Image (cartoon, rainbow, N blue to C red):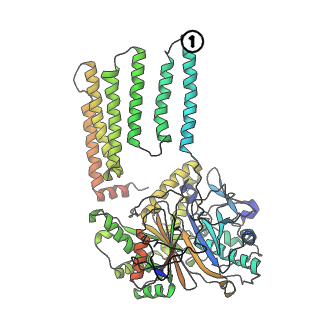
Amino acid sequence: MSYCVNCGVELAPSERRCPLCNTEVINPADPWREPSTRPYPKHMDVILRRVDRQFAAALVAIVLTLPILITLLCDLLMDGALSWSFYVFGALVMLMVWLLPPLAARRYRRMVFLGLDGLACCLYLLGICHFSGGDWFFPLALPLTVVATASLELLVFLFRQRWGRDLLNRVALVLLVAGICAMAVELVIALYLGKLQFIWAPYAMISCWVLAAAARVVAKRKKFREEIAKRLFY
Amino acid sequence: MADDILKKGWIRLDNAAKIYPAAMRRSWMAMFRFSANLSEPVDPEVLQQAVISTTRRFPAFSVRLRRGFFWFYLQHTDQAPAVQPDVVNPCVVMNRKENDGFLFRVRYHDCRIAAEFFHVLTDGTGGLIYLKTLVAEYLRLKYGAVIPRGNGILDCGAPHRPEELEDAFLRYAKRETLPRAEQAAYHVQGTDEPPEVIHVITGMCPVDKLREQARSYGASVTEYLTAVLLATLDEMQRRTVRRVKKLRPVKVCVPVNLRSFFPSETVRNFALYVNPGIDPRLGHYTMEELTQIVHCQMTLEATEKNLCARFSQNVRTEQSLALRLVPLSVKNLVMRLAFHQVGDRITSTCLSNLGLVRLPAEMGRYVTRMDMMLGPLSENRVVLAAISYGGMAQLTFTSTIQETDLPRGFFRTLVRQGVPVKVESNNHPEA
């Protein structure tokens, strides 16, 4: 009969360590011996994982690779060079980048995946710009994609903070970032067009920020929130 | 309608059961388990025969869960599940395909017979009736023991009675209802284990000591255990949350057997919950205060009128035409949301006390110990179940997190208060 010196509980003969505090049992008068039968067997019931993510990733890769190969082959056989197939091929590769890393990775690294998504989108747009003979990628598409990716990354980061888990705080954050985004989008477009003036973005930003401030105020006032919950209870 | 199961071959889910299939996930389903230790090792072949004859006596248990267009339903079968060797992780989510579609399983290990149930089938009282009947049947087949039937042990030779299969919620529901919404409570935080890992810690203590201690506070054993849980949870929250303003209510979900208030012989679900708790922002509580608070809250809430109004709300919702006409897939989403809002979120843990189990002397001489165990809940990762038999109370914590703060604090408090505790776990020394 052994007792845990930390917890004061008696330990069953099967316990080599106290299950409550993990302190080892050292009883010189009665050293621990493995009992002939333990309260529970060793065998563990394993939960069948119905969705094997890595299997799903392999499946998605195969399904997307087939049309890529067929499109490339058709284009090369018909034109003898890479032309129209890039649009299909690029879109499918971008889709692969969006889908495969989250499915295949052991840990779900949302920030990294978002960064990859943004990069894939940039490369696809660069390709379209190159094949269509435009000059809009660097002054327009690249900054807009960077703004969109950075905004999403920022929101993911802020949502992870303790105060960012509250729904109303999240609404406030989305509105705040949406306001900044609107300004950035109009700035990029204005620079591209060569006329530095803001027409619609300030109104969008002010509206978003006013709503964000309202959401934040409501989020802070617990009684007001409860009042709203009471009135809107269904 | 209750007798439909044999005539029509199917039965509707009872009012309480409707939420569980909608709320279950790949890695979680609401499970609980009863076990009985015998004086000799269990013979699996005899146990299988006992399971067949016992399950035949419980037609509401020999069912498989099926999807209808509007609701889930239970399809009756004449078969019985195959007995399985016990595992280190009891109450883990059930693979219904491997279990031949059954919603309960019978397991054995050394001298122990255990039955694990998905809550869709029954509640604690129904589960205990099944296990007692199964053990009685096993003893009859194995040793020829003549065990008087009655007091929660059914006669496997007799046909089932319709009242055993009724949905008692429907019989007793009234017009008066009470809303279910409550404020979210503090939840035990910790390092999540993979879904198949379940830690079990059982504390065994003499019932008379526990009762004596409870009486010294003017409370019942359930109220006293709830107060000890609240004290431990309160202390745990104060360790992690610094600002008093941020402290959340600490509440314990205590299932109440409705059969004590509304006479029924059903073996299906007929239980409701009372959530006694404290607001830690008001200051520190002594054990005297806690037991008084729990005692008063239980007395106020566990009344016939209050309980009836609360389950009537569920029955009214179930009977509303708007909900009934919604397809099951949409309904599942709504019910999952409702479960999230009024399920585990409003309590910090659960304490299910089945109380004192009495067995006839002819059976008691073979049964050395009885245990009850709750499967981990959807959001509350540490839960407690209690049952008393043969002068010993078995208090079993089930947890899916690595930290053992709650059971440690709980058992240490009992020891400090003069209740001797012997602990046992499902840990293996080399693990």
Res B275 visible: no
How many numbered discs sit on the rendered protein?
1
Name which residue type carries label 1: Met
Q: Which residue is mark 1?
A: A78
Chain to which the residue tagged by mark 1 belongs: A
Residue furthest top as drawn? A79
Asked whether, in this view, residue B178 is left or right of residue B156, the answer is left
* In the image, residue B386 above or below residue A94: below
* In the image, residue B224 above or below residue A178: below
Res B105 visible: yes
- Residue B430 screen position, x and y as percent: 52, 65
- Residue B382 screen position, x and y as percent: 46, 66
Say which element carries label 1: helix
* In the image, residue B186 above or below residue A140: below
Q: Nearer the viewer, residue A200 or B239?
A: B239
How crowded pointer 1 is (Cα within 10 Å; few <14, some 14-19, many 20+) is rated as few
Q: Quadrant of residue A76?
A: top right
Asked whether, in this view, residue B135 is left or right of residue B393, the answer is right
Residue furthest front as drawn? A28
Q: Nearer the viewer, residue A91 or A82?
A: A82
* In the image, residue B300 above or below residue B346: below
Q: Nearer the viewer, residue B406 or B8?
A: B406
Residue under the point 35% across and 70% down: B234
Q: Quadrant of residue A127?
A: top left
Residue under the point 29% across and 24% down: A189
